[in-house]
Image: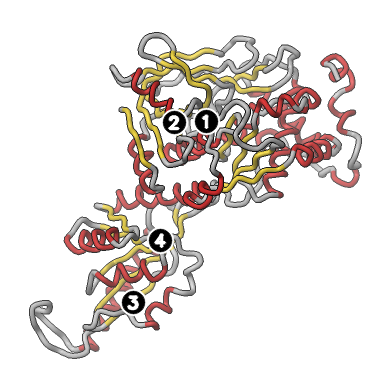
Amino acid sequence: MNRRSFLATGVGSIMAAGVSAAASEPAVAPQGAAALALPPMPADPRATRLAVKPVMTNIIHSAVWEGPCRWSSVPPAEEKARAESHFAGWSKQLKEQGLGRRDEVTVLEPVHVTFSEDFTLKPEEYAKLEPDNDKTDVFFVYPAGSSVSAFDVGNRFGKPIVLVGLGCRNVDIAAYTRARGNEAFVAADMAELAEVLSLLRARKIFRQTRVLFPTNRGLPASCSVGSVWDLDDLKKRLGVAVQTIRYQEMADEMNRVMGDRALGQVAQAAAEDLVRKARRSFLETSYVTRCVQFYQTIQRLMARHACNAFTIECFEFCSSRLPQQWLITPCLLHALFGNQQFASSCEADLGSLLAVRLLMSASGRSCHQGNSDPHARDTFHINHSAPSMKMDGHDRPDLPYQLGRFTTQGWGAKVVIDFMNHEEKTVTVARVDPTARRLLVLKGTLVGASGWDKDLVGCSVEAVIRPPEGRCDEFLRRRLEFGNHLQWVYGDCTRRLQELGRMLKLDVELIA
């Protein structure tokens, strides 16, 4: 169908086939932003919390005596009463004040485990931790009475332990725990504890990533061969799963969506809202509607396959002629998913997608991603039509945006952001290498941009970035090991990104 006949037929007429309106039309179609909002999804990054189990350990001696480890003593009953009072006060404080950021952490019921002078936790003490074991992500330990008991708790259940304070006991526990191959994190104070728990939550989100990848070809992709390719290793080491589906399943779902009048009304309302809020639009609203229908299709397929991330290989997809048939490109999807904290990447580049996930979690902002090429002296540019409106922060208002067309035929909605129209010029750039074992991080300066206020086709939303003085050539050459597509966010989140990479056992290379 050509552009003229598509516009003459109208979106509503095309969507009328298939499911009847009476069977599926809501009383009131969602309007505006509500029409684009994703429902709760499997392992939804917006709803993921780190479940922290507080544990206080304590010693209750069997008798009264003094010696090199006990310079004063009280009867066992009094010692027990003191320990229980201390635990009660600690528990009350945790319940009232919480741990870390309330929107990121769930504090489970605190538990008090005790031992005697043999310094051994008995089965009945471990049993106190069993009810919440499946929920627990980490143990927050107050290690009174001994050091080894904190290690024992984490080791018994295979969970990290977190402590506060750089005093002698916590340092002792951490050194032993790490030497034994287990995880121990020690924060200097409560403020740093919030940061540690935030990063552990980010790691949890990363490890729960499940990517929907429609393809008939599989990997390696026809063009972006620098993607992560060993999917079994990716799942085994990092927990990231990739669910491939055939194009036929995607096409069947797209046809169902286009034939559902109620979904069509939702898509049209969303498209009209996008166009109304845009500072400028270079394409017909009907083409935006069709891209929203593709967004609905992928959203439904992600829910069906329990996925929370998306990629598609543009060259294979283009060659299928489905984009021409549907008059869509994936560009708008990357923006809409990024707006809602879901990782989405161009060209089936999983190294790009993993970096998007890391950057969003580390910065709280969505990304711009694209091809990387040398620019003018000491700079490079990143160019794809894949920014999003939440580059100022997922909890912040949308950045001003325009809507462009990808093709000369007039269709293929894409978002354009004027990157230089932002007070922040420090940026963080990242990329995961094809083995998914290394993370490249750059702290740079945004010095230019293009695409705004221009009716450009193809990939045409560009950011120009200057690396630290004298290191541009070094950075550009590191891409020979890491790959092409780069992702960036506003602000300096290099420290958080470094620590998150280490938590995932990635070798982090920083150029800053």
Mark 1, residues whose alpha carbon is within 10 Å: few (<14), some, or many (≥20)? Answer: many
> What amino acid type should be assigned to the residue bearing mark 3?
Val
Cα–Cα gap, marks 2 and 4: 32 Å
Q: Which residue is mark 3?
A: 113
**Which residue lies at the image location 51% right of the left edge and 33% below the top edge?**
352
> What amino acid type should be assigned to the residue bearing mark 4?
Val
Question: Which quadrant, please, contains the N terminus?
Answer: top right
* Comes first in the chain, label 1 or label 4: 4
* Comes first in the chain, label 1 or label 3: 3
> What amino acid type should be assigned to the residue bearing mark 1?
Gly
Q: Image height check: is 248 above or below 287?
A: below
Q: Secondary structure at mark 3?
A: strand
Instruction: Look at discs 3 and 2 and give the one toward the viewer.
Output: 2
In the rendered structure, are the residues bearing label 1 and label 3 in contact, judged by CB atoms less than 8 Å apart?
Answer: no
**Which residue lies at the image location 76% right of the left edge and 36% below the top edge?**
266
Instruction: Look at discs 1 and 4 and give the one toward the viewer.
Output: 1
Q: Which of the numbered marks, if any, corresponds to residue 138?
A: 4
In the rendered structure, are the residues bearing label 2 and label 1 in contact, judged by CB atoms less than 8 Å apart?
Answer: yes
Q: Which residue is mark 2?
A: 482
Q: Which residue is mark 1?
A: 226
Q: Secondary structure at mark 1?
A: loop
**Which residue lies at the image location 39% right of the left edge and 23% below the top edge?**
424
Q: Image height check: is 110 above or below 287?
A: below
In the rendered structure, are the residues bearing label 4 and label 3 in contact, judged by CB atoms less than 8 Å apart?
Answer: no
- Asked where in the image residue 93 lies, by quadrant, the reply is bottom left
* Comes first in the chain, label 2 or label 1: 1
